[in-house]
């Protein structure tokens, strides 16, 4: 079972504002990393964060799943994380449970191997 952390109202509104920027940065890095070398890694951790905020007359709720992975380049171990957004904490938890413990491919920046990207579209094991 994954860990679940509800957020308070102030943090959820700030998270809502930051979401497009974080998502955009993640997608841009994923696009740029397509030519980076790849190595095997393992998804070791998974957390679910839930936040909700009333916007005008409608309720907007979201949850994030954050998976942490470890990988090795030239005998040196590194770690990274990947975040996805969902409509409910249950969907985010299902995502974490599917991927946690899986072996996966990690792309890393050759001159700075501590900079990495997990590109879900390149994964074969789920």
Image: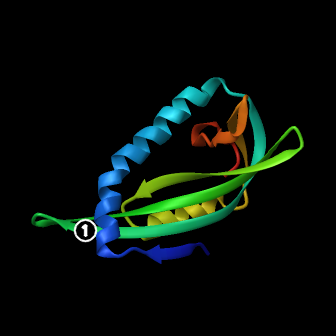
Q: Position of residue 68 (x, y in %)?
A: 64, 57
Q: Say which quarter of the image contains residue 123.
A: top right
Name of the residue lying farthest toward the left: 57
- Camera-side residue: 10 or 88? 10
Is residue 32 rendered to the left or right of residue 89? right
- Camera-side residue: 49 or 92? 49
Question: Dot 1: what SS?
Answer: strand
Q: Position of residue 15 (x, y in %)?
A: 35, 60
Quadrant placement of the N terminus: bottom right
Q: Which residue is mark 1?
A: 53
Is residue 121 rendered to the left or right of residue 59? right
Is 28 located above or below residue 6 in the figure? above
Mark 1, residues whose alpha carbon is within 10 Å: few (<14), some, or many (≥20)? some
Question: In the rendered picture of this protein, how many numbered marks are placed on residues?
Answer: 1
Q: Position of residue 92 (x, y in %)?
A: 48, 63
Is 44 located above or below residue 113 in the figure? below
Name of the residue lying farthest toward the top: 35
Q: Say which quarter of the image contains residue 101.
A: bottom right
Q: Position of residue 35 (x, y in %)?
A: 65, 23
Is residue 101 rendered to the left or right of residue 120? right
Image point (41%, 69%), residue name = 50
Which of the colour schemes (rainbow, by chain, secondary structure, one colour) is used?
Answer: rainbow
Image point (39%, 74%), residue name = 7
Image point (50%, 68%), residue name = 48
Name of the residue lying farthest toward the front: 112
Q: Say which quarter of the image contains residue 113.
A: top right
Is residue 23 rendered to the left or right of residue 39? left
Is 96 located above or below residue 4 in the figure? above
């Amino acid at each position: 079972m994954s860990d679940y952390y509800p957020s308070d109202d102030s943090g959820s509104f700030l998270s809502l504002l930051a979401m497009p920027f974080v998502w955009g940065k993640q997608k841009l890095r994923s696009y740029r990393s397509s030519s980076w070398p790849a190595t095997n890694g393992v998804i070791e951790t998974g957390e679910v964060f839930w936040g909700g905020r009333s916007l005008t007359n409608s309720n907007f709720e979201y949850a994030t799943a954050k998976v942490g992975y470890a990988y090795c380049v030239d005998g040196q171990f590194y770690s990274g994380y990947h975040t996805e957004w969902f409509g409910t904490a249950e969907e985010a938890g299902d995502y974490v449970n599917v991927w946690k413990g899986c072996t996966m491919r990690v792309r890393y920046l050759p001159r700075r191997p501590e900079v990495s990207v997990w590109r879900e579209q390149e994964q074969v094991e789920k």
